Image (cartoon, rainbow, N blue to C red):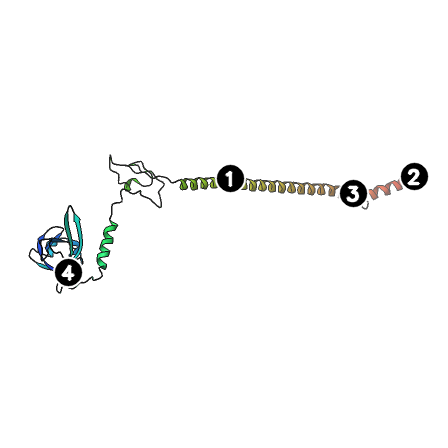
Amino acid sequence: MEALPELYAIFQGEVATVTEYGAFIKIPGCRKQGLVHKTHMSACRVDKPSEIVDVGDKVWVKLIGKEMKDDKLKLSLSMKVVNQGTGKDLDPNNVSLDQDERKKRMFRDYTSQKITLEAVLNTVCKKCGCKGHFAKECFVQPGGTKYSLIPEEEEEEVAAAGRERDKKTSLADESSKKRKKEKKKKKKHKNKQSSESDTDSSDSDSDGAQPASKRTKHSGKPSKSQKKKKKKKHKKKPRD
């Protein structure tokens, strides 16, 4: 067995090959090679590893992982956590390595798990016929699998209770409106009756006042014509 460096050990190696996804480094003292992925070459974004290293270059690396695949040991190396001039460890507590591992865990395959949504649109997609999204947001391809939302029992019960409450409140509102209308009608009817009674009483008062005035005229002093007639009567009596 060839002696391999320990995990998180720092050493200087030679670049053996450069690929699109990284560079393979020769490990001193053995025939093994380790891969420096392009994400571990620099703290900045690296698109082409050939712009960072060339074959035959000597670089400082840190052994950050060992993995067995198909009865083969694969070694993972990192350049960005080591100072390339002095070989000093820039991440002695492996904090940046832990952060990188957490980022990888975030991009797992969750296709086997059930999708749960907090808010659901009350719409039907015209493209796939499923509820909860619009046609422009639909990702179903022609002939592909269709996805639909499964209603929960609790949500159905809550929706039914809400409908019953809405019905009760609407009925109560309608009954209160009817009562108000009836009260208004009664008030209007009473006002009409009172106005009619007032007009009748005023008419009766006016009718009773007219004969009284006439009586006062007859019961007053005799007019001049009446006095003349009396004088004539008194004059005719001595002739007899």
- Name the residue nearer the viewer: 55 or 132: 55
SS category of the residue bearing label 4: strand
Give the residue type that dot 1 points to. Answer: Leu
- Which residue is labeled 4 in the image? 10
Q: Quadrant of residue 94?
A: bottom left
- Name the residue nearer the viewer: 118 or 1: 1
Give the residue type that dot 3 points to. Answer: Arg
- How far apart marks 1 and 3 lie (CA) works out to 68 Å
- How far apart marks 2 and 3 lie (CA) works out to 38 Å
177 vs 104, left or right, is right
SS category of the residue bearing label 3: helix
- Which residue is labeled 3 in the image? 215
SS category of the residue bearing label 2: helix
Query: Vertical placement of 124 versus 59: above or below?
Result: above
- How far apart marks 4 and 1 lie (CA) works out to 80 Å
Asked whether disc 4 touches disc 3, contact meaning CB atoms under 8 Å apart, the reply is no
- Which residue is labeled 2 in the image? 239
- Which residue is labeled 1 in the image? 171
- How far apart marks 1 and 2 lie (CA) works out to 105 Å
Query: Vertical placement of 48 versus 172: above or below?
Result: below
Label 4 vs 3, first from the N-terminus: 4
